[in-house]
Amino acid sequence: MSEPLKALSLATSYHKGENDIAAEFYLPCMRNAVSYDRAVGFFSSSIYVLAWPELVGFVERRGKMRIVCSPILSPDDVEAIRLGCGAEVEARIDQQIAREIRSLAADEVLGKPTRVLATLVQIGVVEIRLAFMTNTTPAHARIFHDKLGIFADPDGNAVAFRGSMNETWSGLSFDGNLESVDVYLGWDEGRDAERVRTETAYFERLWENDYPGVQVRRFPDISAEELSAYSDRSAWPEWVKEIQEGVEAAPRTPGGRVPRKHQLDALAAWEERGRRGILKHATGSGKTFTALLAIRDSLLRGESVLVLVPSRLLLRQWYKEIAETLEDLRPKILRCGDGHDEWRTKHLLSSWTSPEARDSIVLSTLGSAATEQFLSSVRQGDHLMVVADEVHRLGSLGNRAIFSLQTGARLGLSATPERFRDEEGTAAIFTYFDGLIPVPFTLRDGIHCGALVPYFYYPRTVALAEDEQESWDAATAQIRQLVARREQEGADRASLERQLQELWIRRARIIKRARGKVALAVATLSEEYEDGQKWLVYCEDSTQLTEVLDAIRAAGIRAHEYHTQMPGDRDQTMVYFSEFGGVLVAIKCLDEGVDIPDVTHALILASSKNPREFIQRRGRVLRKAPGKHLAFVYDPVVTPCIGDEGEPDPGIVVGEMGRAIEFARDAENPSAASDLERIAGRYGVDWADFVEEGIEDES
């Protein structure tokens, strides 16, 4: 028997870190309510409101839940709605949501919550309606992404709340970002009661499609049928119980973070493989946190740990993460690199990596770790665990010396551990770490689990200039000659491979630095940029950055530069960008581990056909941030110069298509694939049937 909401002792606000929002606020209200109205984000967010043990009692009390959420709309859909072409858009959205339901139901983690939702919709406990913004344009598209909830009990007492909170079954007080909610009590006369009345009236107007600027419509028929197919009236209470048991069984770090299922599965698979292997997990998967859980286990076993990172920036980030996540173990951390040279002069490495060093972590850049002095000082043996971030970096000729270390547990981390056109380096990595840990965690997985935001992809063509085409053709001719010589008997293959590598890099840079990209950047920003948006224009090098920055400013668009050698304060530039938006013209930040999660629009001029590079860059653009619900990626696709003589070599388009198809495959707008097919067809390329290639550019 539930008590009135008035019997609860509720605070005016709750903040994760200081409060357990689930235990102190959300679950007590759910336990005592008979109705729950919720405005959430996208449709997939709807499944999160359901997986609580209090849900069974809510249904037994004949409770009712109404959910208003938003479909993902492309700018073309927004324009069609604005022009009154709603029927066509609704048909596309219906099919889109049906696909999303199938995907959610098939997901190992989200499948049960989705089936719970399906059943509750079928038995009439939950009703869903979709909200569309109408007073918007493609240039400045807005989405319905309200965060409002209203509980009510049988006596009519109501509690309203607003805030950043999402109800995830992994626990509001532990998982994800810092969250807060503000709470208003309907029986507390004064501003609270007025606020509850206002919010209740607002929700009712939304529900009845009577609020300006928003269209709220019933759940589409095809999607409803798809959802109904996954319902089971008899099984859903057991599903809720199983979900909750999984939550309770999930270990929490002293800092309160809860490992996600894919992280626990990866660690279990790593253990089964003798604590050896490489995590091929996309940006947003929490690779660092997964590794820290493995390091925690290693320290508790009495082992010492060696953590290897490719850059000074990542050295600093890892130092901070280790100190915070493993605070309860109070490990000693010896930094090597980035100006930390104590290990050289005081001969500390031997003692810090000895079998007796049970609480020691050595954190080193690859530049330091690959030296003879470092390697000869490390105490090798089964007591030593090695963790390598961005593990593909270890496969270069200069870093492979690290593979001489004889250790026990080994864990490599990378979204793309394979080194393209470097089979020898890739083989060395996979041999040392004993291959991949199943199952890889993809970027699409990151979007589905809410770690990354969905995105729209817009390829835009830019042709090489005549002299650029001549340089590309000359490099291509040299490559063909060297490849032919390499196959001859008695050829100096090592020397020819080095020459080929240099030529591949030189030719790739012609594409990356194509002069037409400067004009494309100006045209794209002039057409698309709106005040308040947060754009990143990502350049290949400082020369291109200067050209683009000058051209953008000459077009009257205010822009800021961001790179390691910039004048002024980089941190303050980021603070300003985060608060006010604008255009940030940058180099290297997406490849050096710098997080700029606030970016909503990215124009990536530093095009690459190396999957490691473009997958990493795309993943960083898709990172979540407060108020960020979608991302937009603009990608220059370089095409040949159309001259007067002969047919253009389609090789350039073939090289560009590998990246472009990968971007289009996971995008929310199907038109991206059609655009690519037209571009490829123009040059006689079968866009869906060729091999992706890439090079590893260590410079």
Image (spheres, grey):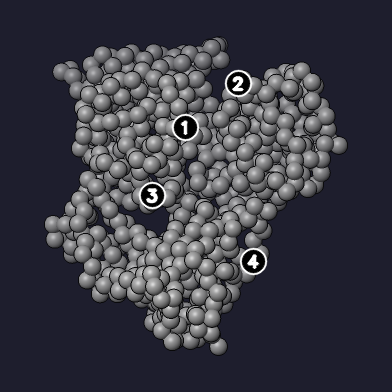
Do labels 1 and 2 touch, CB within 8 Å?
no
Q: Is residue 106 above or below residue 392?
A: below
Q: Give the percent coordinates (x, y) of residue 615.
A: 44, 38
In front of the other: label 1 or label 2? Answer: 1
Disc ID at residue 397: 2
User: Where does label 4 land, which residue?
Assistant: 248
Given the image, on which type of amino acid does mark 1 rest? Asp
Do labels 3 and 2 touch, CB within 8 Å?
no
Given the image, on which type of amino acid does mark 2 rest? Leu
Q: Quadrant of residue 249?
A: bottom right
Q: Which of pointers 1 and 4 lies earlier in the amino acid sequence?
A: 4
Q: Give the percent coordinates (x, y) of residue 365.
A: 63, 27
User: Where does label 3 land, which residue?
Assistant: 628
In front of the other: label 4 or label 2? Answer: 4
Q: Give the percent coordinates (x, y) of residue 281.
A: 54, 45
Kindly give the residue lying farthest to the right in the view shown.
Answer: 356
Q: Which of pointers 3 and 1 lies earlier in the amino acid sequence?
A: 1
User: Where does label 1 land, which residue?
Assistant: 571
Q: In the rendered view of the protein, which quadrant contains the N terminus?
A: bottom right
Q: Is residue 590 above or below residue 63?
A: above
Q: Which of pointers 4 and 3 lies earlier in the amino acid sequence?
A: 4
Given the image, on which type of amino acid does mark 4 rest? Glu
Q: Which of pointers 1 and 2 lies earlier in the amino acid sequence?
A: 2
Q: CA distance from mark 4 to mark 3?
A: 30 Å
Q: Which of pointers 4 and 2 lies earlier in the amino acid sequence?
A: 4
Q: CA distance from mark 1 to mark 2?
A: 35 Å
Q: Nearer the viewer, residue 60 or 240?
A: 60
Q: Give the percent coordinates (x, y) of residue 655.
A: 36, 30
Kindly give the residue lying farthest to the left in the view shown.
Answer: 83
Q: CA distance from mark 1 to mark 4?
A: 40 Å
Q: CA distance from mark 3 to mark 2?
A: 41 Å
